[in-house]
Image (spheres, rainbow, N blue to C red):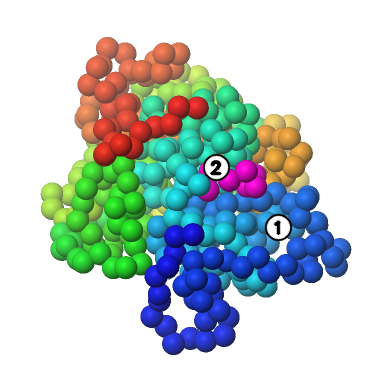
């Protein structure tokens, strides 16, 4: 095990015990009654074992969803940040009563572990493709936090690996497991709004920051491993925070991708019934002139389709009013997290209720459980690799349109641009640092 550093804390009791586990570098395999399948619980042989790859804020949020499922056992945690490991171990102890969980900072050993059935991947974006391809290559089912990758071709490699290995894939686009988003899409697909003229997608834009000064690397983080394939950059503790590293181009494409994928996926949930991809993309954007966070600040992109509504995709500075709007000939409907805004009469009509209209979308009310059930019963997950790759492609195309500043024509069959080598070059992975490379699956 890799975690041998101490933590500064005066707390005792359960947390003190967890610290002693971390100090020893091992997690004792304390056998509890529920682990033996006593008390009516699912026996270990019938549980899906999950290793968590990335135990930061998003990883822990996802962990909590899996810890509450009876057919799941989280058996391993992997992170290069010991503070994250400590917090993740506390969650496991609260759920299981003992920290009988393996700890490591080596994702290769996690992916190779034959006792693990599935991987929950919630790493920073610049790590998504390499680490996940290792997991998929080892035959692990994968719950894949969005976005797919830093480039289109990396995402395509993930797509092809999942198809080749036949594993279950679930994208972290949890809105497909939200009734309100499903309802809005079913209303649009069933003609309750009239013909759809346009789909508007509004998400939070980027952020401006000062230039973060270099800091001494603290003992709790292996900064070299955290950077991994990304270009070398000086350490500052803010870069460990998702709010910042997702707005730094060394590590991410910015909110255009990290936030955009959620609402673009909902727009594509409707459009994929008619067309798998747009035929052209045009857009513009603004980038910061100074500061550490250098990803796109705001943008306005239009995806044009031959046989589906166009999607207008914007990222204004005001992040408080993100939403998807289906603009129909008769009326419009707006949906965001927790809110479905439409004509009251339409929503009260019994023939317009979710799941009661002729066109019905796949149903899920629990994203983690949907993934687990797909593994257990050999089903497709609600955000399987087919739909996920198509939705993520929209983010990649938008980013390239903003960076080039010109209208691009997309060839869906060849998956490249028409007569635009400069844009095609942006589909490719950037050069990785050191010996890092994309695994062959």
Residue 383 colored in magenta in the image:
no
Single out the mark in the foreground, 2 or 1: 2
Measured as percent of width and height from the top left, residue 130 is found at 42, 38
Mark 2 burial class by Cα count in 10 Å: few <14, some 14-19, many 20+: some
| In the depicted structure, whether residue 360 falls above or below residue 232 | above
Q: Earlier in the sequence, mark 2 or mark 1?
A: 1
Q: Quadrant of residue 63?
A: bottom right
Over which residues does the magenta segment extend?
110-117
Residue found at x 65% / y 65%: 29
Measured as percent of width and height from the top left, residue 240 is found at 33, 60
CB contact under 8 Å: marks 2 and 1: no
Q: Which residue is mark 1?
A: 69
Q: How many marks?
A: 2
Residue found at x 51% / y 76%: 20
Label 1 residue SS: loop
Closer-to-camera residue (25/427): 25
> Which disc, if any, is residue 336?
none
């Amino acid at each position: 095990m890799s975690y041998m550093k101490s933590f500064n804390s005066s707390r005792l009791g359960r947390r003190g015990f967890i610290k002693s586990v971390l100090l020893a570098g091992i997690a004792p395999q304390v056998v509890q009654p529920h682990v033996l399948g006593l008390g009516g619980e699912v026996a270990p042989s019938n549980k899906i074992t999950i290793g968590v790859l990335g135990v930061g804020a998003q990883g822990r949020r996802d962990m909590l969803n899996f810890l509450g499922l009876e057919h799941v056992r989280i058996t391993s945690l992997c992170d290069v940040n010991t503070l994250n490991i400590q917090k993740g171990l506390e969650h496991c102890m609260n759920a299981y009563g003992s920290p009988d969980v393996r700890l490591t900072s080596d994702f290769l050993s996690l992916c190779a572990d034959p006792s693990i059935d599935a991987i929950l991947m919630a790493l920073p974006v610049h790590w998504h493709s390499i680490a996940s391809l290792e997991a998929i290559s080892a035959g692990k089912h994968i719950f894949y936090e969005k976005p797919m990758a830093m480039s289109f071709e990396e995402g395509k490699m993930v797509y092809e690996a999942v198809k080749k290995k036949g594993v279950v894939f679930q994208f972290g686009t949890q809105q497909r497991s939200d009734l309100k988003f499903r309802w809005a899409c079913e209303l649009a697909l069933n003609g309750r709004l009239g013909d759809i003229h346009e789909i508007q997608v509004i998400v939070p834009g980027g952020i401006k920051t000062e230039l973060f000064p270099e800091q001494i690397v603290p003992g709790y983080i292996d900064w070299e491993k955290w950077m991994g394939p990304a270009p070398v950059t000086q350490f500052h503790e803010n870069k460990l925070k998702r709010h910042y590293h997702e707005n730094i181009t060394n590590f991410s494409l910015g909110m255009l991708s990290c936030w955009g994928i959620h609402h673009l996926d909902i727009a594509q949930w409707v459009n994929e019934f008619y067309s798998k991809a747009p035929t052209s993309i045009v857009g513009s954007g603004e980038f910061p002139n100074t500061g550490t966070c250098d990803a796109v600040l705001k943008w306005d992109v239009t995806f044009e389709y031959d046989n589906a509504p166009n999607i207008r995709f914007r990222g204004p500075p005001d992040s408080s009013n993100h939403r998807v709007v289906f603009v129909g000939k008769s009326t419009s409907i707006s949906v965001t997290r927790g809110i479905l805004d439409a004509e009251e009469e339409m929503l009260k009509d019994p023939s317009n209720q979710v799941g009661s209209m002729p066109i019905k979308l796949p149903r899920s009310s629990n994203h983690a459980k949907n993934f687990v059930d797909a593994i257990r019963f050999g089903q497709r997950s609600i955000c399987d690799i087919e739909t996920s790759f198509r939705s993520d492609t929209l983010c990649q195309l938008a980013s390239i349109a903003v960076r080039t500043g010109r209208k691009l024509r997309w060839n869906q069959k060849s998956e490249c641009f028409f007569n635009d080598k400069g844009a095609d070059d942006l589909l490719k992975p950037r050069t990785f640092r050191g010996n890092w490379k994309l695994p062959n699956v």
